[in-house]
Image: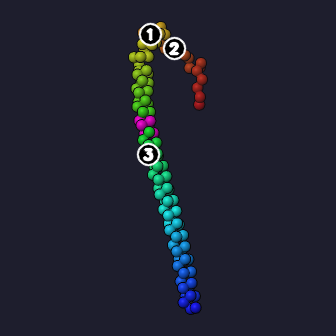
Amino acid sequence: MFKQKLGGLINFKTKNSTRFVSSLQLIIYCLSLASVISYLVLVNRTNTMGFEIAEMQLRINGLKESHRDLQSKTTELQSLPRIKEISNVQLNMVAAESFDYVSSPKSAVAVSR
């Protein structure tokens, strides 16, 4: 009778320990799976951001080049020879040969004190 009780106690302990081990294995498996999935999501997100950054860098370089071109065109259009050409050809303006200055009596001019 003592052997039967002792045998039942040992079987009970082995069944519980087997259940505990299988539960522990399941938990470890689930945690491993979750960590692998989170790693893949993180790597994918990082690679996607890298591509987006490279694309934006190319766009920035293109905009800088466009800005340089516009600056040079602005400088060309604001040059004095171009303005003289437009004023003579398109606006029919003539350059003044001499300048006459008008002088006024001192009493006609307002002076602030």
Is 90 or 112 nearer to us in this picture?
A: 90
- Residue 4 is situated, as x and y percent measured from the top left of the image, at 56, 87
Note whether residue 93 is visible.
no
State the image quarter where residue 73 is shown: top left
Looking at marks 3 and 1 on the same chain, the residue that comes earlier in the sequence is marked by 3
- Where is mark 1, residue-wise? 88
CB contact under 8 Å: marks 1 and 2: no
Secondary structure at numbered mark 3: helix
Looking at marks 1 and 2 on the same chain, the residue that comes earlier in the sequence is marked by 1
- Where is mark 2, residue-wise? 102
Which amino acid type is marked by label 1? Asn
- Residue 21 is situated, as x and y percent measured from the top left of the image, at 51, 72
- Where is mark 3, residue-wise? 50
Q: Can you tell which of label 3 and label 1 is closer to the viewer?
A: 3
Q: Is residue 90 above or below residue 18?
A: above
Which amino acid type is marked by label 3? Gly
Secondary structure at numbered mark 1: helix
Q: Is residue 13 above or below residue 113?
A: below
Q: Can you tell which of label 2 and label 3 is closer to the viewer?
A: 3
Is residue 36 magenta-colored?
no
State the image quarter where residue 112 is shown: top right
Q: Residue furthest bottom?
A: 2
